Image (tube, helix red, strand yellow):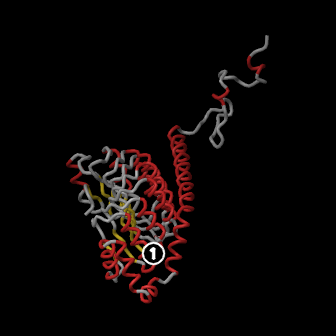
Amino acid sequence: MSSSSEATGGSISLGSDPASTAPCVGCPKCPVCEQDLMNPVMLQAKDELAQTQRFLEEARQQIARSEETNAQLRQEMAALKASAPAEEEQAHPAAAEEEEAKRGPEVSQLLEEARTQIDGMLTLYDRDLADRHAVALAEWLAIHKCYKLDLSCNKIGDEGVRALAAVLSCIREALYLAGNPISIEGVRILAAALPGSTLEKLDLDSLCLGDEGTRLIAAALPMMSCLKDLHLDQNQIGDELARILAATLPQCATLSELHLADNLIGDEGARAFAAALSQNSTLRVLDIAGAHSKMSADGVRALIAVLDTNSTIWTLVLPVGVLAPEEEERLKQNNRISFGYLE
């Protein structure tokens, strides 16, 4: 009667399930039983990193598909710019006036206001603007350009975002779209236009980006070589999405301010940012406060501990009321730490 070791060619069998001894490429193995020797915490971190990389790759693929949609719009806007409308207006003033009348008095007034803002800072915050206004502005921007466009708290949806995305290169420094009813389709279109833009500030507060929207924006960030200031407050961002954003920080060489207030970030997200900041030398402001924060004292302390090794961070804004009152009061003596909202 042969022993089990003879049946297996002299090797020691630990069970009948082949998967229990299946090799794992890249992990150290016990030479006898071939079981993983890597620390369980390291294994979990490795799995999370691989998952994050897959998420980012999927988002980049979605951006590439959206770029095809935007290409036609860019061509249309380029053709509009090449048609020299200013000369046509001089040659046919009656036709130009008729076209303005067709747009409606609100749009005509809006464009007249845009013409008078010679400093290139076009502020149209909370003006009840809709898609048709955004489309008209995009046509105007294709010719005139501006440095800053603030369209926060209006009623601009996907159609308006599509038109603005086609002329994003004409908005040179800052774009504010906070608080507009943009769906995930509009976010896809915008994310496809962001790579290569000259935007230094992007405000996407209160868009309810959620899971897919945040992934799309995160995938575009490393390709925005001028971006310095990003606002993603009130966007339902939890720990998983926080890990994805934290993973992009090493690739964002110019980003100096990241605002994530009033999201759903807990201790896992806080630790992900703490790990990223320990290797980051560009981010100067991180605002992760807000009433909806899920952080405990452990998460807050993990972020505070980073300040001991990272001298680049100027301002760390944390949720108020998480730490004991006396500990919070003591930490307020550090001018790099704030609790509550960033003024």
Identity of the residue drawn at 78% across and 24% down: 9
Q: Find residue 119 and report its horizontal and vertical position in percent.
A: 34, 82
Q: Is residue 137 left or right of residue 54?
A: left
Quadrant, the N terminus: top right
Quadrant, the C terminus: bottom left
Tell me the element at label 1.
Answer: helix
Q: Find residue 239 and report its horizontal and vertical position in percent.
A: 41, 46
Amino acid carrying label 1: it is Cys
Q: Nearer the viewer, residue 126 or 292?
A: 126
Identity of the residue drawn at 52% across and 67% down: 73
Q: Nearer the viewer, residue 330 or 121?
A: 121
Residue that numbered label 1 is attached to: 170
The tally of labels here is 1
Q: Find residue 282 and report its horizontal and vertical position in percent.
A: 43, 65
Q: Is residue 2 above or below residue 342?
A: above
Identity of the residue drawn at 57% across and 59% down: 64
Which residue is outermost to the top?
Answer: 1
Q: Is residue 140 above or below residue 244?
A: below
